[in-house]
Image: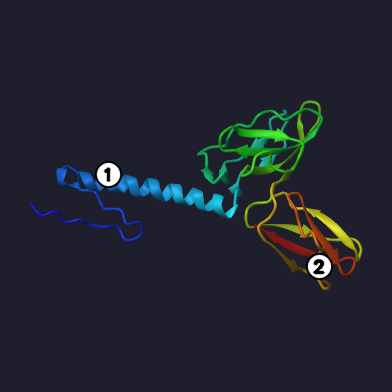
């Protein structure tokens, strides 16, 4: 009997025909194709250095030392992490300010440095605690996110970017008159942007990825 196959146009998957043994090889090929596609999507994020939060994972204060955190999508070490529900994070150290990161092997962790402990970790944000509660949070900057710049004087200034790693690219978009440009020779590092303001009272949005 002739085997008529239907190849789906967007993915290249062969549409299965249940109960026909002639299509078993197609089923095997489908799984191999899916496996390869998922591997390539993670490898691309790793190759480009685009690890971080893409959506969600919003922090919130809490009456305990365990901060609130919504579900979302992030990449760490090139691996996608997208839990179906809100993930559980460990309790933050009391009476301190720490940064919450995610590692694809060990999960969530806190540290005092805003720079990832392991290359490829995703920064969730900054958490400040009292003796028994999370009192303040600052959300990490998402991949293809932005931070606001509002220098108070016409001079060099430093702006923390909250990416958890050195940006791959940065673009300054002015939202007022005046100009903001990068200092030389260091434009940015894993923690900060190093900028220059032409005037006081000017503003900008700085796009990062």
In the foreground, 66 or 36: 36
Name the residue rendered at 32%, 45% in the picture. 31
Under circle 1, the secondary element is: helix
- Does 31 appear above or below 168? above
Asked whether, in this view, residue 204 is left or right of residue 46, the answer is: right
| Disc on res. 180 | 2
- Mark pair 1, 2: CA separation: 56 Å
In the rendered image, which residue does mark 1 sit on? 28
Q: Is residue 110 visible?
A: yes
Q: Nearer the viewer, mark 1 or mark 2?
A: 1
Name the residue rendered at 82%, 63% in the picture. 184
Q: Residues within 10 Å of mark 1 (few under 14, many from 20)?
A: few
Do labels 1 and 2 touch, CB within 8 Å?
no
Indicate which disc, 1 or 2, sits on the residue closer to the N terminus.
Answer: 1
Q: For the view shown, which residue lies furthest in the left direction?
A: 1
Q: Is residue 20 visible?
A: no
Q: Position of residue 190 (x, y in %)?
A: 73, 50
Q: Position of residue 162 (x, y in %)?
A: 72, 49
Q: For the view shown, which residue lies furthest in the front direction?
A: 185
- Does 207 appear above or below 55? below
Asked whether, in this view, residue 19 is left or right of residue 103, the answer is: left
All told, the count of numbered labels is: 2
Under circle 2, the secondary element is: strand
Q: Position of residue 52 (x, y in %)?
A: 62, 48
Say how the picture is coloured: rainbow
| Disc on res. 131 | none
**Rendering quarter of residue 197:** bottom right
Q: Position of residue 120 (x, y in %)?
A: 61, 44
Q: For the view shown, which residue lies furthest in the bottom direction?
A: 177
Q: Residues within 10 Å of mark 2 (few under 14, many from 20)?
A: many
Quarter of the rendering occupied by the C terminus: bottom right
């Amino acid at each position: 009997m002739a085997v008529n196959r239907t190849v789906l146009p967007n993915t290249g998957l062969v549409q299965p025909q249940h109960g026909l043994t002639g299509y078993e090889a197609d089923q095997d090929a489908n799984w191999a194709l899916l496996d390869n596609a998922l591997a390539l999507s993670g490898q691309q994020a790793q190759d480009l250095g685009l690890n971080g939060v893409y959506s969600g994972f919003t922090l919130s204060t809490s009456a305990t030392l365990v901060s609130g955190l919504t579900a979302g999508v992030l990449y760490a070490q090139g691996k996608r992490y997208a839990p179906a529900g809100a993930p559980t994070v460990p309790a933050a150290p009391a009476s301190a300010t720490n940064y919450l990161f995610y590692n694809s092997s060990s999960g969530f962790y806190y540290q005092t440095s805003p720079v990832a402990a392991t290359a490829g970790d995703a920064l969730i944000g900054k958490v400040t605690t009292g003796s028994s509660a999370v009192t303040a949070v600052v959300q990490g900057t998402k991949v293809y996110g932005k931070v606001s710049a509002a220098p108070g004087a016409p001079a060099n200034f430093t702006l923390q970017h909250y990416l958890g790693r050195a940006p791959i690219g940065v673009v300054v978009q002015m939202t007022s008159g005046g100009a903001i440009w990068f200092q030389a020779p260091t434009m940015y590092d894993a923690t900060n942007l190093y900028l220059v303001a032409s005037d006081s009272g000017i503003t900008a949005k700085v796009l990062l990825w």
